[in-house]
Amino acid sequence: MIAASPPHTELSVASHDILREVFGYDRFRGPQEAIVEHVIAGGDALVLMPTGGGKSLCYQIPAIARQRMGQGITIVISPLIALMHDQVGALHEAGVSAAFLNSTLSGEEASAVEKRLLRGDITLLYAAPERVTTPRFLAQLDSLYERGYLSLFAIDEAHCVSQWGHDFRPEYRALTVLHERFANVPRMALTATADALTREDILDRLQLQEARAFVSSFDRPNIRYTIVEKKDATQQLLRFISREHLGDAGIVYCQSRKRVEEIAQTLCDEGIDALPYHAGLDAKVRQANQDRFLRAEGIVMVATIAFGMGIDKPDVRFVAHLDMPKNIEGYYQETGRAGRDGEPADAWMSYGLQDVVNQRRMIDESPAGEEFKQGLRGKLDALLGLAEATDCRRVRLLHYFGEASGPCGNCDNCLSPPAVWDGTDAARKLLSTIYRVQQQSGISFGAGHIMDILRGKSTEKVAQHGHEALSTFGIGTDLSEVQLRGVLRQLIAIGAVEVDAQAFNTLQLTDLSRAVLKGKVPVQLRESVSTPVGKTKRATTARGASKVPASLDAAAQDRFTALKAWRGEVAREHNLPAYVIFHDATLAAIAERAPQSLDDLQGISGIGAKKLEAYGEEVLRVVSI
Ligand code: ADP
Ligand code: ZN
């Protein structure tokens, strides 16, 4: 049944040769080489790499090498059913035999794949965990295993096995069957989620305690981090996009479905090609929007966190957060979707008092146990620390993942160090006002009222409660409302003030308040930069605008544009995203080289043997026009 021919002796199993021949790349990135060698030799592995770090090659190259060595098939387990078609398509383009089994296939298509599987006629098979653990599929694996034709299990998005990860999928727990049933088959688990709890859980749940762990640097140097103070978030976002990213593909994350719809509409009204994505949309609409984002150029996807896992579009130029995520892991994974191609990209977030209050409230109101909530609070605090930071954001991010580094020169705080002011005195005024109000009235009040007292405003409420008589009435007149909000935000962020969601969002003192009142905890605040509020100009050039690398001379730019148009046609014909055919960087390199012959195309990054054969002549024709 298995193809009886010996392994392809004419094809090299050396990992470098496969990298060059199949993928057209010159060198491995970071620890890729060590991982690939370890797995080719039959070792188990845990691979922790940031989003965009290059995890796919870590199992694809061993799969190809081991197939060539006669070891058989690699099973890739992934929760990303909606992306399997494109992942397999990308492998076909590179000349690798691959297939997927999931619920999108008809019965007939599925049995055709199963036949190929049993014949051993596939190098990589993608399947979802719930499929892999069915008795039927396990029996098919038994048959391969008995014949020594089951080569490797690659468990992608392995953090899904952990309830500490943010994408917990109970089906992942059943994957222990693989180890028990196919003890001699190497397994690797891959994830971009790096925190210690999740990592322990992965090793434990998947019984990978013996596996070698490969932990990459989590730095993504091409991503520029910017966190701005939220004023009018929608206008701030419009300004950011129209100033820096007209015509670029990007993702905008919002907290709620309603907000996603609103923002997508606003962007469209401003001439920016935007689409909504959230779990409340019909599955067909979601899939269509995702396909359009992947296939068309320069689309902005406005989404909840339901969007993005496994999205491997390399040329996403920005990720914007209109609301603050829950923790640094989430923030880092989401922002990591920008700039996978290594070209400059932006991670932009607007953040304000309401974000702090909302996130704290969500934790307080969740039905989880107190210990679990404490864990969530700790994670939120780390993110608040990042948002309030006046020093290098990247240093803070990497520190969170256990890496030491120096100022990066590519974040907002490094590029334009914020003016800071000592807010300790202001913080004390605020805290003592909360204290006195509570003393005098026996109840607590919300932020608005406390600010009014500080700023000496004689409102109805102030009069009603006799708060004009307080010694702190009007002691904050030297501070602007923006400054006071900044002080309050930071006090909430560090836990020196609590917002009681059960009691009309009133402000409460905490144990830490006393230390701040005594001046023992300094409060450093960033000076609020006031940005002009003027309406942004309509982004009329956004739609259909296509970016051309400025580094190319005029003739090369023309070639680039022609190549892009040609690539679009091929992608449509093959029903695949354009970047699966060639990345922009590959097209730019071709345009620059102005090749006259197939030989001239050799060695351009991203052109492997199969693509050279399939597209070489076409490319020469396109650039010769
Ligand atoms: P991850 O799954 O870790 O988020 P991917 O596997 O999607 O990342 O890789 C990100 C991008 O980097 C892809 O477009 C891939 O083609 C590219 N890439 C990966 N490894 C290399 C390499 N050694 N040389 C050049 N490009 C690479
Ligand atoms: Zn920095």
Image (spheres, rainbow, N blue to C red):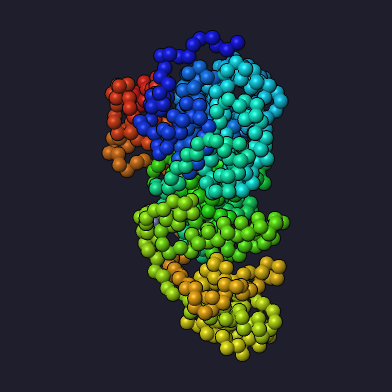
Position above or below: 229 against 179? below
Q: Residue at x 65, y 41 (%)?
A: 169
- Image coords of residue 563 (percent x, y): 38, 31
Q: Tell me where residue 36 sits by quadrant.
A: top left
Mark yes or no: residue 109 visible: no
Position above or below: 247 against 412? above
489 to the left or right of 108: left
Q: Residue at x 57, y 18 (%)?
A: 149
- Image coords of residue 220 (percent x, y): 42, 47
Q: Residue at x 53, y 35 (%)?
A: 211
Q: Tell me where residue 449 sits by quadrant.
A: bottom right
Q: Residue at x 61, y 65 (%)?
A: 357
Q: 572 or 97: nearer the eye?
A: 97
- Image coords of residue 514 (percent x, y): 56, 77
Mark yes or no: residue 70 visible: yes
Q: Quadrant of the N terminus?
A: top right
Q: 586 or 40: nearer the eye?
A: 40
**Quadrant where ligand 2 appears:** bottom left
Q: Quadrant of the C terminus?
A: top left
